[in-house]
Image (cartoon, rainbow, N blue to C red):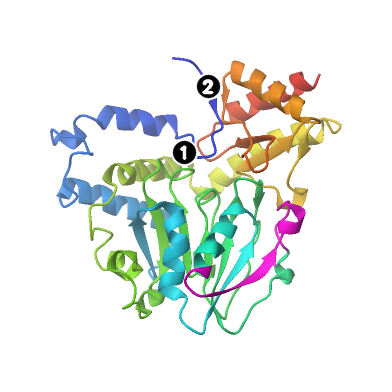
Amino acid sequence: MAHVYNFNAGPSALPKEVLERAQKELVNFQNTGMSVMELSHRSKAYEDVHNEAKSLLKELLTIPDTYEILFLQGGASLQFSMIPLNFLQEGKVGNYVLTGAWSEKAIKEAKLIGQTAISASSKESNYKTIPALDELTYNEQDAYVHITSNNTIFGTQWHSFPTVSHAPLIADMSSDILSRPLDVEKFGLIYAGAQKNLGPSGVTVAIIRKDLLETNVDHVPTMLRYKTHSETNSLFHTPPTFAIYMLRNVLSWVKEQGGTSTIEAKNAEKAKIIYDAIDESNGFYSGHAHKDSRSLMNVTFNLPTEEDNKRFLAKAKELGFVGLNGHRSVGGCRASIYNAVPLEACEALRDFMISFNK
């Protein structure tokens, strides 16, 4: 098997220990004689996995009892519609902070359903920064305020979150959930596709304050109501059982690593290694994001010319580096260094960057 350094932006690297556990249990899960993919979602064997995943997530993120944990389908992209369908009532405004492509897509969907506003935007700078907290504007009619905590394409991240008291703060945390400790009580709703830090693609986690489930949603299709899934323990219809099983295993791995504080320290160390290679290159590498907005999950950078970018990426591929191409809307290079990417991969990338510069 070829050795590779996996820097894919998503679906992305999974911990080796998690993959090996899945391999071991794949054919005969807990002596059931079946794979976890074959189990009925109503069976005790699967329900134990399902409930353990919820319990571990609650423990790792210190989620209060006033919140419900849901396992949904449709990715974070379906949440762009579910949120306004459930909360954007007539006479109210969906207020969005634009920090990249995903927040643009979120507000685009909301505009199909109701009135929207832009709280702040860094689009004019090609999303190189996160707006300062005192730049955010609110409306008395806000149904909610929506942010994207980390921006995979542009390599920016919120390092502190706004305190919003007049409306629920909603966050798309698809690309940095579980990468650091989190004050859940700042938010009315947190949602995240699993395929970056939580597991494989196929399941979306939603952490929702229970009082928000009481909103009148009689006009919303049954499957698109958060209340539907809350009342049935996310078992209203067949859930993505294998993805939830893998989520459970990733959460167990994070706990074994020491929890989110330990993970945060490791992520900071990994990011510093690559950012130092950029900053110490005398301008040969240039980061896209401003230093005060840099992401610990996605390091985006360019070389002096497009030809240099192409040569760098071609040589990197030869050496076993996977997924370093920047997003097509930005170009250049991107190293996605989610929780499961080991320190050794970041050190190897740094060494290659230094040698290529020379």
Classify residue 189 as left or right of residue 266: left
The quadrant where residue 69 appears: bottom left
The quadrant where residue 333 appears: top right
Residue 298 spot, x, y in % from top left = 62, 42
Q: Amino acid at mark 1?
A: Pro
SS for dot 2: loop
Classify residue 196 as left or right of residue 205: right
Residue drawn at the location 30% of the way across and 64% of the way down: 223
Out of 347 and 94, give the one closest to the viewer. 94
Q: Is 199 above or below relative to 24?
A: below
Name the quadrant of the C terminus.
Answer: top right
Whether residue 62 appears in this view of the structure is no
> What's the CA distance linking mark 2 and mark 1?
15 Å
SS for dot 1: loop
Mark found first going from the N terminus, 2 or 1: 2
Q: Which residue is mark 1?
A: 11
Residue 161 spot, x, y in % from top left = 62, 64
* Label 2 neighbour load within 10 Å: few <14, some 14-19, many 20+: few
Classify residue 213 as left or right of residue 48: right
Q: Is residue 124 magenta?
A: yes
Q: Which residue is mark 2?
A: 4
Residue 35 spot, x, y in % from top left = 20, 35
Residue drawn at the location 52% of the way across and 55% of the way down: 173
The quadrant where residue 132 appears: bottom right
Q: Amino acid at mark 2?
A: Val
Most distant residue in the right direction: 282
Q: Magenta region: which residues?
A: 111-131
* Label 1 neighbour load within 10 Å: few <14, some 14-19, many 20+: some
